[in-house]
Image (cartoon, rainbow, N blue to C red):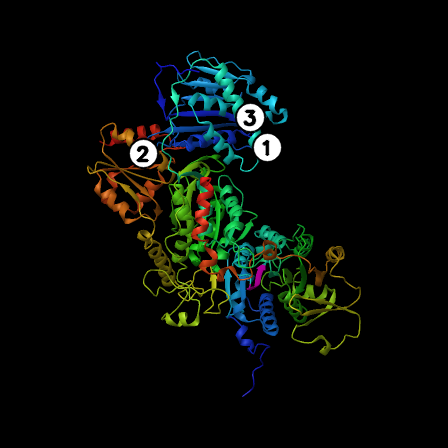
Amino acid sequence: MSVMKLNVIDLEKSEYTGGKSSLCPGCGHDQISNVIIQAAWENGIPPEGIAKMSGIGCSSKTPAYFLGKSHGFNTVHGRMPSVTTGASMANKSLSFIAVSGDGDTASIGIGQFVHAIRRNLDMVYIIENNGVYGLTKGQYSATVEKGSRKKKGTMNEQPPIDLCAMAINLGCSFVARSFSGSKKQLTALIRAAMGHRGMAVIDVISPCVTFANNDESYKSYNYVKENDEVLHMLDYIPHFTPLEEVDIPEGEYDDIQMFDGSTLRLETVGDDHDPSDAVSALSAIHRAEKEGKHVTGLLYYDDSMQTADEEIGLTETPLSALSEAELRPSEADLAGINAAFRGD
Amino acid sequence: MEKQETMERICNDFTINIATANGTGSQSANLIVLNSMFQMGVPVSGKNLFPSNISGLPTWFIIRASDRGYQAPGDKAHIQVLMNKDTWQKDLDSLEPGTVVIYNEDVKLPVDRDDCPSFGMPMTKMARGINPKLARLMCNMYYVGALAHLLGIDDAAVSDALGRQFKGKEKAIELNTRAIGEGRAYAEENWEGGIPYCVEARDKDPDAFLVEGNEAVALGSIFGGVNMLSWYPITPSSSLAESIIEWLPKLREGDDGGATCAVIQAEDELAAAGMVIGAGWAGGRGMTCTSGPGISLMSEFIGLAYFAEVPGVIWDINRVGPSTGLPTRTQQGDLSMLYEASHGDTQHIVIIPGTVDECFEYGWRIFDYAERFQTLVFGFSDLDLGMNNWSTAGFQYPDSPMDRGKVLRTQDELDAVADYGRYRDVDGDGIPYRTLPGSGLDPVLYRGTGHDEDGVYSEDPDVYYATVSRLRRKIDGARDLLPAPVIREEEEQQIGVIYYGSMENSITEIDDMLESTGLSVSTCRVRALPYHSEVESFIERHDKVIVLEINRDGQLYGILRKELPVELLPRLHSVAYTDGIPPRARVYADKILETLEVTV
């Protein structure tokens, strides 16, 4: 009998898997689900400590397909961030992993996306971005590039909403872009995002094999593979692996320390990208867009921001775990209120 | 000045109407008049008819003094205070002969009513004498002094009310005391003849004080253990959220000094509702407060909470609809929307306080209902109850511990439930058990899509029908566990009047008007939906039943017609009227009498 591999908290990977996917065979979203499973398992996060959140759409169905031992909430279209906000206030000890799509985030839910970022909610926000509405059979979404053409229908003429550029402008504390076909890069980014405290937005280009995987579509497998402008090579070193035991890369590199003590190692390829520089991150995005490219990697990172619960100053115990004695003021308190109203 | 011996004295039974412009500080002056009478033990009520505007548009404040305890705005003004040039003539024209007029001479408009005793005072000029910069605000204090003189309001009561209004602001107290004193002295020296109206001190209940319904709900919510308040500003509910924010630090700090309730000003009402559901899903007590337009926006989430069975609380402080409507006026126009909000077949619990005591009580109890029935529960108040001052003898401490509902928190608790499934009706009451995120106990993916008893996605016809049938059974089962109606019943069971909410403040007077015609009238105040079985038995015992409401269409009447046994329907008659003003007893009593005549 073969010995099953265990993670740092002695769990098999099967403890992190979910139900069978009902998405189209070959869908990029299923690859992302597998990466989420891998990342949570490798990071050794107890499954019960994770909360899976999603809105509505193909991508938002996927929480049924990963982390079956975690509670989750498949909410309403575009409104996942507000439900996550309330849940995070009630129980800030949960690790929120949210999945949304480009329709769910860039159109109907753009307001909630914006405001969750402004609050720096402590969550991982993964956008599975394919430029089309899949479940309603292939209408363009707001992230489709100008000049891109899906399998059927006319070319898109409207400029796209770049969710990463938007997040950076809003002061998001962790902004990355990746590709569902780049397993190593995506795994490192999701693992790092899980170790980050604050809002981590990862925009993952995830081809729709049914409606937009033709070569004229800027989000098809072939197109992204050929036009992926990688910012850096990424290595994730968890907090339980001592850095000195990790091989030093031959070339130049930067280490970024995550909140949980883990490290994201950025190995320079070509031009050096400084993720603390919002302006250079934005110019990288805009330059790539102009050239019809997709820039991928950790675009922006800022660990100095207060999270929503810190700003509010929540008590240490998760609010959902407080006792009645802690939640209901005393009879003497009420007597004092009545007396104050009476002017006693 | 000697009072005229011959004049008929009318004590503690009159209505004052004070016409000012919004944003001139008149609300402080008005509340001082109201509170000083209240401190003398005079039963009073105050209604603020304010515009949707920060500064300039007309405002009226109506003070009713009534030894009989009538709190509705009176049918007419006995004393009219004129401060606002924009409404001057219209206000004058509307007065009945004999109405006492007190006016600011500095407005420089004529008072062309020889049939009304009129008293002018150069209020602005006098206020300028004290402080030119504050004259616009302080001139209002002169009518306080004038009214105190004419009605015989004690100096001590005025000082007391002034102190309450400007808590601790010594400079404001000093200046305004001077202005009121000058107003009183001017009236004494310059005004010939008295007026028939006066106040007479009564034995004041030493426990009684005035408070707004919104503040009462806010305090109740804090005693109910609210963990998360999400809100989006909207009149007339903003003061509810702001009261919670004001009281929280004094009442609800954790051991480490941290907050035990998160307050989030949301980006819109949709987000506010989403946060409530998120908090409830994660095991917290979440609430938001809004008005009709907010409920319209929240409707999608309301359906999610109903179908996914997530507890949460939404207070609707009703204003006048439809659409933006009359944002600063009152109505009971949202009831049927609340009861069946969101698409598909839904039904929601609605809790309806009619007094500030109930605002406090339901403020905490509503969380117990939400968690017990694992659903979204509405608190239903309105602008009149929420933003006007009402008397209470003091809030009562909760008489029962928190009910956190059927939550399984440990493996042992989970194991003890035979055949557990998130949506399985184990106990036969339609209410399933639930486990919380973070517990690792039988996790499910909550969803607004069809689901089976284990929470797994399902489009199976039998599964769907079983689910929605159980949901109906669950809410229906709440009827007799929710607040029972308040019934005041005559022995002779001729006419029954069913009403709810802020109509409580007008019902005594309406009842007296009806009984003065020889009718025997019982009343039944509904305090929750789905309605209690006692409502049905009240209808059974009465020959004719009027359903009295502050809306156009008779919304509770519609709900009753849908749910009552068909043989009771012929007894039921709707009297519904709304014009934005808190219900005047005469208007509603006449409409009831008309309806009864037609149905004889």
Residue range in magenta is: A93-100
Under circle 2, the secondary element is helix
Residue found at x 38% / y 51%? B347
Labelled disc at residue B171: 1
Under circle 1, the secondary element is helix
Quarter of the rendering occupied by the N terminus of chain B: top left
Q: CA distance from mark 2 to mark 1?
A: 42 Å
Q: Residue A15: where, in percent of width, then height?
A: 53, 75
Q: Is residue A33 above or below residue B568?
A: below
Q: Residue A88: where, in percent of width, then height?
A: 55, 59
Q: Is residue B152 above or below residue A278?
A: above
Q: Nearer the viewer, residue A70 or B467?
A: A70
For label 2, the crowd category at 10 Å Cα-Cα, with few meaning under 14, some 14 to 19 and many 20 or more, is some
What amino acid type is highlighted by mark number 2? Answer: Thr
Q: Is residue A140 visible?
A: no
What amino acid type is highlighted by mark number 1? Answer: Lys
